[in-house]
Amino acid sequence: MIETQNLTKNYGDLTAVDDLNLTIQAGDIFGFIGPNGAGKTTTMRILVTLLEPTRGKAFIDGLDVRKQGKKVRRRVGYMPDFMGVYDDLKVFEYLEFFAAAFGIERSKRKSIVDGVLELTDLQSKQAATVDSLSRGMQQRLGLARVLIHDPKVLILDEPASGLDPRARIEIRELLRELKRMGKTIMISSHILSELEEICDHVGIIEHGRLVFSGTIEEIRPRLGIHSKVRVRVADRQEKAVELLSALPQVNQVQAVGDDIAVSFNEGQDGDGVIARTLVKADLDVISIQPERLKLDDAFLQLTKGIVH
Amino acid sequence: MTIELTSSFLYVFNPARLFGPIFDKELRVSSRRRRNYVLRCAYIAVLCIFILSAWYSILGARKSNPAVYQVSRFSQIGRTVIASIVWFQFVVAQLIAVIMLSSSISDEIRAGTLAVLMTTPIRSAQIVTGKLLSKLLQITQLLAISLPLLAIVRVFGGVTWTYVVSGICVTLTAAVFAGALSLLLSTLYRQGHIVILVTVMAYMVVFGVLSGLFNLLAVNGIFIFNRNTTQSILALTNPFWAFAAINAKYLFQSGIPVSFSWPLHCLLMLALTTVVLGLSIRRIRKAALGEAFDQGRKRWFKRDAKRNIRTYSGSMRLDLVKPVIGPPIVWKEMYKGIIGRRKGDIGLSALLIGAFLLLFVFIWLAGRGSVGMMAFPSLILSGLYLVVMIRLAVFSAGSLTMEKEARTWPILLTTPLTDGEIARGKAVAAFRRNMLLILIYFGLLCLNYIVLRKLGGNDNWLLHTLCSLVVSACSIAGTVLFVIGSGLYFGVRLRTTTMAVAATAGLYLGVTYLLCGLFNPARFIILRSISSHNLPWVIYAMPITLAIVEAGIGGVFARRAVRQLRRHIF
């Protein structure tokens, strides 16, 4: 649905996006991660036809963003990192204005606006002026605007920035709902844990270059990180450590407080083996918990903190 | 010992220590801004054009005259050049002071730094004086540019030192007052261009229309004071009258009002400035508190409290919602109505309508044949026309830059609306929002023409009036197209509304001066036609030619604006 081929954007001597090759499948939620100044916003702006690339190509739904800008704009809903609003307009008017801008017939506008207001839970605020809304509500209004022309692709630049935890959860739920509706979503965020929960794929960008693209599970072998589990037994922790260290699948065993951290050899895991071994030795197992690779950890390992 | 004394002196009289850190910060920032260098270049360029045109008006038209005759006119040239320079400085210094200080406080509020400043030991007075004096220093630098020229002309004769000194003093005090007023208004209005417009309009009404009315009433013997007393009071309180009086007294030795003293006028202006600054100091804390508590900011800068209450309590009142009819861009721009909803818009419109009403009184009095009424309405009409055109510039240039300032521009550009549709929508809305004022202006112009022609006693006055009105309509149409086209262009190219409006208005004034002045190519063609064929129709051809040229330039600007619409988004 979204594809870039050797996409490059220069601002004078500065290369904001450097030979970026990216593919996002239809119906995916793609998390676009990178430090400040890495080139995320520039990439997104090129995709929504606001900037012209210096080199390379970008396609949305098979359309060239450079040559078929108007058609691309009909298929894309874009929410910038800082969403400006028209102060004087009311919520309903704001959405109706964009419905008119997208060429939706007047007779259909009301039902469409009502629909997106219901989806974003803003019905009670439809006659309130836009600037009287809270930040969270304004972000939801931004999402409502993005949906007004029923685009196939949503490009959201840090939609949860500056929101309180409740508003962030609401936005996350809304994105899940949009995924169920079959939208392809490209989302950038600094709140990595949030992306981890909703994204199918992630792309990590630094210094304008894509340093990783794939599922979160695919990051582990890329980084040479071993699977880990945390084991807790009722007593005789030393005995458990001894038994687990002797297992051929296990790379390293370490007692961490009441827990035992077990690291498996590359390409191997074995929660079952651990359970069987400990039960056979008549040890009371309280819990065996796999340790997931956190997106924050992957981000820190993949990026060096280099910014323009 | 000497070094110690020098360093002590420098410490004691260090401006940053005397006027506080704001003054220091403003000077540092202003030296880094490109626009300040552009301003200085533009100032020198326009000053040169002014001097050249003054020179040309005396000597250039008589090239065939012998050298002796030309030398004999040098003293007149000196007087004319100096009068041009000091008048130019007098007007431009005030205008620059107003523009520079128009967003001095509102920018701090928008950046969220005013409330932070208020949490430091810096006093409100230091903020206000720091802002004012730092800008005043730059204006003084501009005025100093022409000092060598004034000195040279003084050496060659034709003017006295008193004239030069009094002219500069009156100019400086007028600039300080204008800047202080602009600073006060910037604590009230959020947008710089509204501050500029309100200040200019307030000047026109108080120092132009009302002063003129009092003078004319006094001349006709229907005012509480007699003619001499009224003119003396006006010269003391009105910088324009004072400046005219100085010119009359020291340059042309005629028409001096009784008991006029320019030092007294300067002291009075400084006293008025102190009062205005005092008000600013009081206002600034309120504005900062409003910023600290966001609700207050909304009340000060966005709408009145009453409207807020209606919004919050009436959240379900969909009957207040306006349906989108017609082109969406035009609908959005027209949403605020012809006058606008902000305090600045309403204030400006009230001032304009008030000025038009007063003008109607003038014309009515002129129709009755009152003394001195013949020329005054035309002068005021020209001034009001200027304000209407600047308002048009605000709506055409501001409609684009306000989108940038509100960060809605990228959102609008990701809709399928074409660049042409966006630009056309903005242009149509700018015209429609000013159409009423243009029509009122044209109505008053018709009335003025009829009165003047009738008083002139011409046999064909009706025919001439009709011809004049047709020509005026063409001229207005040409100017409207020019202002809208250039406004769109500068709106696309520049980031802030204040800069875009200042550029549009500056270009409009410059082009108007060039086209109507001595460098107008059409003028020579037409003058030649008059001298060779002596045809009466050429009198009307010149403004029509100018209108066509203006419309053409406007069209070129509009075309370039459409082409560059997506080039300066961020």
Image (cartoon, coloured by chain):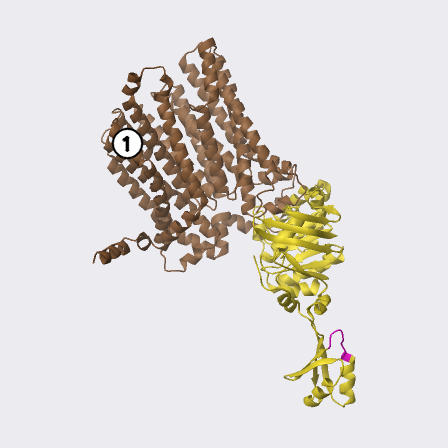
* Count of marks placed on residues: 1
* Depicted B219 relative to depicted A117: above or below: above
Question: Residue visible at 62% across and 52% down?
Answer: A42
Residue B538 on image: x %, y %: 48, 14
Shade of chain B as shown in the rendered figure: brown
What is the span of residues highlighted in magenta in the rendered image?
Answer: A265-271
Q: Quadrant of residue B93 in the image? A: top left
The chain holding disc 1 is B
Residue A175, compared with residue B33, is above or below; it is below
- Left or right of B278, for residue A112: right
- Residue B336 is situated, as x and y percent measured from the top left of the image, at 56, 40
Is residue B65 inside the magenta stretch?
no
Residue B71 or residue B196, whichever sits in front: B71
Residue B280 x %, y %: 37, 48
Residue at 49% from the left image edge and 24% from the top image edge: B443
Q: Which quarter of the figure is the N terminus of chain B placed in?
A: bottom left
Q: Quadrant of residue A289?
A: bottom right
Residue that numbered label 1 is attached to: B152
Number of residues whose C-alpha sits closer than 10 Å to that of mark 1, classed few (under 14), some (14–19) or many (20 or more):
few
Q: Label 1 is placed on what type of residue? A: Ile
Residue at position x 63%, y 68% in the image: A301
Residue B399 in view, yes or no: no
Q: Is residue B524 left or right of residue A28?
A: left
Q: Position of residue A134 (x, y in %)?
A: 58, 56
Residue A171 lies in what quarter of the image?
A: bottom right
Which color has been applied to chain A in this rendered view? yellow
Say if the magenta span includes residue A270: yes
Q: Is residue B46 left or right of residue B554?
A: left
Residue B527 visible to the viewer? yes
Q: Is residue A48 left or right of residue B515?
A: right
Q: Secondary structure at mark 1?
A: helix
Secondary structure that dominates the magenta span:
loop
